[in-house]
Amino acid sequence: MRIEVHPAAAEFLVAAEEALLRAEALHNLVLGVASRVREGRLYGDATPYFLTLNEGREVLIAALRTPPYPLLLAVIDPRPGALDLLVQHLADHDPALPGVNGFLPYAEEFAWLWVRRRAVRAEEEMRMRVYELREVSTPVGVPGTLREPREEERDLLASWIRTFQAEALPHDPPADPHEVLARFTGPGAWLRVWDHKGPVSMAAGSRVSPRGARISLVYTPPESRGHGYASACVAALSQLLLDQGYAFCTLYTDLANPTSNKIYREIGYRPLADAVVYRFAAQERNRSPSPRNAPRAPSSR
């Protein structure tokens, strides 16, 4: 087994895309981020990096990092010792790695290996579930309609994006909400609002892979919650994307939010896998090295 470092997203996708596309919906996040970097999207001031771990011509692991965000880890073909080799490489080349984001059990095993090697602590930040939809079950009886946002609503939607980031992504560096709005109302993206006597909910869709689109930025202000607007909005946007020719839609949910997981299942989203984000930090004096939400040792060890 060997690590290959790819100098840019384009080279990374040449090397890894075919392997990732074997489970296209599952690997939508890595495919989407790499594609956006290839197209010129910046996630921070530091240079991103891209890795594959190969055996012969087979890609076993694909990973990338867009600082300041954690490592995105995609284990395509798990092999004994593969994650150890990846951890060894990153300990030498990115020793201040802030965390890892990937599917269970591989992200948990990576975090456990990192803690052992770097003598840091790892704490679980969020558990997520990735869902896939291929056929929409439209909610019944929700008043309103899906439409494009209007120019005079840009400040309102930017304020919704700011609140969404604070609620859903509290540990990530906040992006400028007007830049996010511009990105999701530009080419290749679909931000839509649900209108019932005015905008009451929003959701965004974007292409992440050749056959798949991802739903994100789902937000309903507190005064409009409890009426089914988010369900109707996501269902209608998902149908719009399928009508555009995409074979499937994906989305991520926070497993700590049972309401969102319930409504997505009701409109046709089916779970594919669970993922976890671990954050790494230096050990604090007098702190237990094994906090309650620390990664567990792999059962095979």
Image: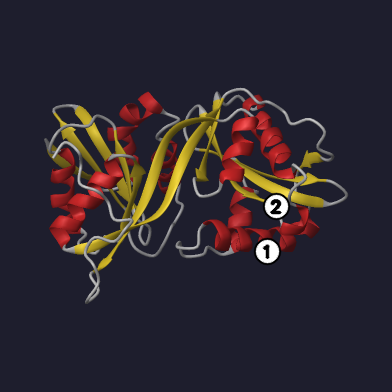
Residue 178 seen anywhere in this rendered image of the structure: no
Residue at disc 2, secondary structure: loop
Nearer to the camera, 274 or 190? 274
Disc 1 crowd rating (10 Å Cα; few below 14, some 14-19, many 20+) is few
Residue hosting label 1:
159
Nearer to the camera, 191 or 39? 191
Distance Cα–Cα, label 1 vs label 2: 12 Å
Residue hosting label 2:
220
Inspect the image, locate mark 2, and give the three-letter code of the amino acid beneath it. Thr
114 lies left or right of 267: left
Inspect the image, locate mark 1, and give the three-letter code of the amino acid beneath it. Ser
Nearer to the camera, 47 or 101? 101
From the top left corner, tell me how far across and down residue 36 is, in percent: 45, 46
State the quadrant of the N terminus: top left
Nearer to the camera, 296 or 252? 296
Residue at disc 1, secondary structure: helix
Mark closer to the observer (1, 2): 2
Disc 2 crowd rating (10 Å Cα; few below 14, some 14-19, many 20+) is many
Does 170 appear above or below 226?
below
Residue found 74% across the figure and 61% down from its top: 156
